[in-house]
Amino acid sequence: MLQVLHSGKTDELELSGTRRGLLALGQLLRGKAGNVHLSENRHPFPYERALSEIAFREHPERNTASIVTEGSTLMIEGGREALNLLADRIEGFASEADANHHGHVDFPTYDYIAPESDALVIAFTG
């Protein structure tokens, strides 16, 4: 189970799910392209809305990964190395974090994330 919540005020995103769901997303990101339908959340407080899908694709000529919202979809696009590093971050969080912790993925903290990306928080569904 995964969900992505979006704040239009701050352009911040929260990706949350079970350990198993986050680990599965990390594995999917290692492929060339794909999509994941998200769990519905009718009350996304403190965010304004829930997204319905994550779509991703590899762009061999890029060396960063962009994380942006397009309508109701979270789009993740980037070079293979950047997508693998993002997958590592998500899988590492899912494997090692305590249930009440969260992690951040943003530019410039992580240089494999493109500057135009929305800030992403990773959390466990609670």
Image (spheres, rainbow, N blue to C red):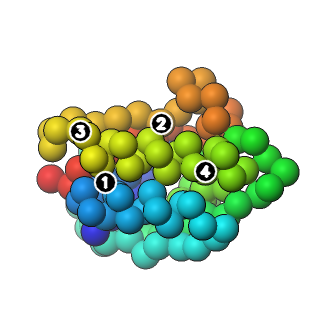
- CA distance separating discs 4 and 3: 21 Å
Tag 4: amino acid: Leu
Q: Nearer the viewer, residue 98 or 69?
A: 98
Residue at point 46%, 62% (across, down): 27
- CA distance separating discs 4 and 1: 18 Å
Q: Secondary structure at mark 3?
A: loop
Residue that numbered label 4 is attached to: 83
Tag 3: amino acid: Ala
Q: Are marks 2 and 3 in contact (CB under 8 Å)?
A: no
Residue that numbered label 2 is attached to: 105
Looking at the picture, does residue 16 appear above or below residue 42? above
Which is in the foreground here, disc 2 or disc 3? 3
Tag 1: amino acid: Ser
Looking at the picture, does residue 22 appear above or below residue 9? below
Q: Nearer the viewer, residue 93 or 73?
A: 93
Residue at point 27%, 47% (across, down): 95
Residue at point 58%, 73% (across, down): 34
Q: Is residue 33 left or right of residue 74?
A: right
Return the x and y of residue 78 as percentages of the image width and height. Answer: 70, 51
Report the disc number at residue 16. 1
Tag 2: amino acid: Val
